[in-house]
């Protein structure tokens, strides 16, 4: 399907174009394996000489159709689904970093990603330097080393909803000859397409707005095809020199712009196996069909709720990029002119205790470890998602101890506000 179509059309139709007599709706290929007529046909696929399906751990047609839809939405050249957002971020980096390597990351990122980077990847011998995303280019430059292989950041940080200056990060990354990887989970391609601002690779937790209904955990990696790996071949031997596990095939030579995703599929999926279940991909696809309708409603409701909270005298502070008082307002106007997402943060006067009491008094808005789905929900990161972080790390990640993460759903906003109002009366 032509990528000239507008985003809403791509949401509904990209990735699956049935031929005569085929199902109109993307089917679930609920099969671990695929049949061939000769041993030779199968052997050619094992050597990556021919593309085709042979085992679902590597590729499955349902997953590929959905990955193709997200790739079209992001304006990339190749994409793949993973079993979770965590797997997507790990693979995106591990595909180009090995023991002894280093990468640079913004500090204001999702707690799970922070842990992956600071604890688990460190155990694998891959180190990272955390940087303040609002630092000057001069300061950011100081974080680079001779073994730095990538730069990472979130378009909108979870939970702080701070906007990343993608162009600045891309400039700094490219000046050091490394790609910029952007986790675009919160805005989705409906509100921001990081490739247009210089990012090279985009990741998603599709668990959030893309699925949109809290039915399936999943992730996705999309490659823009823009980063010239061969220009820095000494840094990326995994892509630019022969892979012994595939009879000496070199990914950049054999697959051109598809090299990065092919390697992640052929090596990482083969060896580590975080495939998304085809049934989950099917659910994700149904979610994607309405992404362009849901995102504006999330943004509209969140803007209304943020403004209402900002005027309430029991509220100490509200952070949402759509508020003029937000430190991210200017960057939001540049990168997210049509709206950011449905997530906002706030704290109550009286701090941590009052915030918890307020949450316990909510009726329509539920306390759940989730964010970015149709139903409004709240979470207290310091007690929940980020409880493994020290106070110092919380501060570095931009999370105040009283911070309530509020994921505004797509219910009628009057009912959402009424619930906030009745719960505030109890504190
Ligand atoms: C939730 C989330 C993740 C992790 O995704 P899972 O699907 O839960 O594994 C990564 N990045 C961001 C920004 C997220 O919000």
Image (spheres, rainbow, N blue to C red):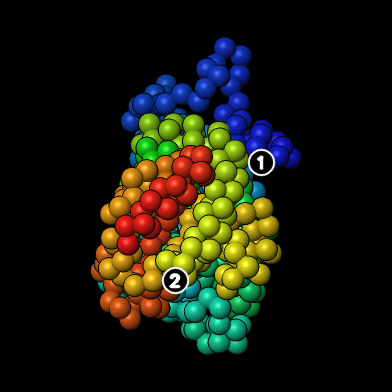
Assess disc 1: are there few (<14), some (14-19) or many (≥20) residues with their C-alpha within 10 Å of its C-alpha. Answer: some
Q: Residue at x 37, y 37 (%)?
A: 215
Mark 2 Cα shell of 10 Å, populated few (<14), some (14-19), many (≥20): some
**Where in the figure is residue 77, as x and y percent of width and height?**
61, 48
Give above or below for 267 relative to 10. below
List the residue tagged with mark 1.
7
Query: The C terminus appears in which quarter of the rendering?
Result: bottom left
Can the viewer see residue 259 in this picture? no
Q: Nearer the viewer, residue 411 or 46?
A: 411
Q: Label 2's element?
A: strand
**Left or right relative to 311: residue 277:** left
Q: Can residue 25 be seen?
A: yes
Instruction: Point out the residue furthest to the top here.
Output: 21
Residue indicated by mark 2: 316
Q: Nearer the viewer, residue 253 or 422?
A: 422
In the image, taking residue 285 as reference, residue 176 lies left or right, namely: right
Quadrant position of residue 53: top left
Q: Nearer the viewer, residue 361 or 152?
A: 361
């Amino acid at each position: 399907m032509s990528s000239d179509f507008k985003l809403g059309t791509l949401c509904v139709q990209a990735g699956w174009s049935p031929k005569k007599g085929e199902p109109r709706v993307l089917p679930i290929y609920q099969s671990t394996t695929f049949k061939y007529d000769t041993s030779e046909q199968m052997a050619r696929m094992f050597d990556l000489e021919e593309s085709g399906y042979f085992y679902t751990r590597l590729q499955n047609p349902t997953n590929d159709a959905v990955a193709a839809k997200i790739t079209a939405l992001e304006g990339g050249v190749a994409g793949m689904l993973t079993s979770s957002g965590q797997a997507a971020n790990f693979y995106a980096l591990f595909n180009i970093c090995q023991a002894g390597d280093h990468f640079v990351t913004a500090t204001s990122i999702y707690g799970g990603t922070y842990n992956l980077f600071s604890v688990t990847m460190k155990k694998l011998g891959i180190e990272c330097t955390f940087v303040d995303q609002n630092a000057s280019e001069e300061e950011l430059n100081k974080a680079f080393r001779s073994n730095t292989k990538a730069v990472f950041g979130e378009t909108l940080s979870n939970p702080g909803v701070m906007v990343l200056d993608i162009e600045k990060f891309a400039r700094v990354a490219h000046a050091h000859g490394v790609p910029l990887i952007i986790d675009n989970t919160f805005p989705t391609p409906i509100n921001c397409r990081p490739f247009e601002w210089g990012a090279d690779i985009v990741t998603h937790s599709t668990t959030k707005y893309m699925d949109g209904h809290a039915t399936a955990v999943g992730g996705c990696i999309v490659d823009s095809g823009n980063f010239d790996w061969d220009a820095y071949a000494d840094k990326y031997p995994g892509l630019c020199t022969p892979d012994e596990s595939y009879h000496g095939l070199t990914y950049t030579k054999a697959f051109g712009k598809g090299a990065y995703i092919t390697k992640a599929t052929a090596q990482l999926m083969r060896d580590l196996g975080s495939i998304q279940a085809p049934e989950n991909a099917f659910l994700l696809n149904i979610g994607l069909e309405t992404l362009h309708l849901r995102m504006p409603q999330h943004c509209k409701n969140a803007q209304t709720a943020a403004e209402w909270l900002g005027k309430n005298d029991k509220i100490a502070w509200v952070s949402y990029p759509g508020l003029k008082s937000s430190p991210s307002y200017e960057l939001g106007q540049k990168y997210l002119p049509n709206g950011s997402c449905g997530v906002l943060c706030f704290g109550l006067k009286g701090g941590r205790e009052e915030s918890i009491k307020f949450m316990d008094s909510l009726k329509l808005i539920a306390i759940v470890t989730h964010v970015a789905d149709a139903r409004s929900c709240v979470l207290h990161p310091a007690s929940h998602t980020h409880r493994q972080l020290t106070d110092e790390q919380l501060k570095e990640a931009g999370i105040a101890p009283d911070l309530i993460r509020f994921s505004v759903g797509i219910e009628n906003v009057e009912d959402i506000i009424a619930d906030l109002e009745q719960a505030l009366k109890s504190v």
